[in-house]
Image (spheres, helix red, strand yellow):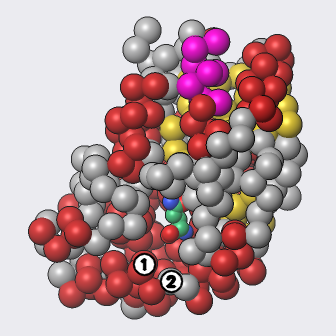
Amino acid sequence: MKTILDRISKHADAQTERGAVASYIPELASVDPKQFGMSVVMADGQSFSVGDAATRFSIQSVSKVFTLALALGRLGDQLWSRVGREPSGLPFNSILQLEHERGIPRNPFINAGALVVTDAILAGHQPREVLGELLRFVRAAAGDDDIHINKAVAKSETEHGARNLSLAHFMQAQGNFQNPPEMTCGTYFHQCAIEMTCEQLARAGRFLIGATGPSLISQSNVRRINALMLTCGHYDGSGEFAYRVGLPGKSGVGGGILMIVPNKASVAIWSPGLNAQGNSQLGTEAAEKFAEMTGWSVFG
Ligand code: GLN
């Protein structure tokens, strides 16, 4: 495994086409695009890392996996009356489909869907309680208490949050929002601003490995979340990721990808430059090389 990671890292270092760092959240625009890190944690706990795997980055939409786990645990199938389970085929922040489909987002991993999930777990709670619960979950999953929210990133996104607020207001108009849009969006911006290293994120992902990982959620929810990661985890790049990599993954505009090899391993990859779909450019290439070199795939 170490040899595989070294080769992937060497390949990444040699690339000149690294994509563009997200700039619509100004605090993320200054991240150095030359970074690349990757960590693999096996089902038995053994771990391997390479490159900038100990550098903290903004997990952004990777947080949607953790909030979905909390929401499914709390609400079960009730959640699916408010959000669908189909790939959207559109950018993560698109508002187009939402009007056609009467304020019911396609899936929990596009922004509109993740806002509904956060809105659902807020019910009857204060934002700080929900964020506290989320941090407890992520820290327990990673076995590491040194995981925090970067307040400057949350503030930066709040100041430039018009697009997410518009999604929330539209859903409110359609009767699919329970809390004030500012409150749910504020909570969502803070969840996205959680920072982790690849080492921490790969450890935090172990609860999704399946029977052999730590059991923080039910096995049926492990399978369901993995299915959604495979079909919707990379927005309008999900089909391409499934084709090229063949493993469930969830990306974020901070350049992180959490990838699960069912029954075998949890993998975190980070490189801040993004491709046209807002997924890590080098991270996606590394995921493809990793799948090729290990021969691991959910398709046998
Ligand atoms: N916080 C970001 C947003 O809402 C998350 C998007 C992402 O990581 N794809 O735009």
Q: Which mark is residue 164?
A: 1
- Asked whether, in this view, residue 105 is left or right of residue 13, the answer is left
Q: Amino acid at mark 2?
A: Gly
Badge 2: few (under 14), some or many (20 or more) residues near its Cα, within 10 Å?
A: some
Instruction: Considering the whole magenta stretch, tell me its main secondary structure.
Output: helix
Q: Position of residue 216 (x, y in %)?
A: 59, 43
**Left or right relative to 82: residue 195:** right
Name the residue located 30 percent from the left edge and 56 percent from the top edge: 90
Specify few, some or many for label 1: CA neighbours under 10 Å numbering under 14, 14-19, or 20 or more.
many
Helix, strand or loop at label 1? It is helix
Magenta-drawn segment: 286-293
Q: Residue 8 appears in which quarter of the rendering?
A: top right
Find out if the beta carbon at label 1 lies less than 8 Å from the nearest ligand 1 atom: yes
Q: In whole angstroms, how far apart are the C-alphas of marks 2 and 1?
A: 6 Å
Q: Looking at the rendering, in which quadrant would you find the C terminus? A: top left
Locate residue 63, reporting x and y percent. 57, 57
Quadrant location of residue 148? bottom right
Q: Is residue 189 magenta?
A: no
Q: In this rendering, would 16 be left or right of 166? A: right
Q: Residue placed at 74% from the left, 26% from the top?
A: 11
Residue 58: quarter of image? bottom right
The correct choice, above or below, for 276 with respect to 49 in the image is: below
Tell which of 267 and 243 is nearer to you: 243
What residue is pinned by disc 2?
A: 161
Give the x, y percent position of residue 262.
53, 23
Q: Under 8 Å from ligand 1: the CB of mark 2?
A: yes
Hey, what amino acid is under mark 1? Answer: Asn
Residue 249's place in the image compared with 140, above or below, is above
**Residue nearest the observer in this picture, 31 or 46:** 31
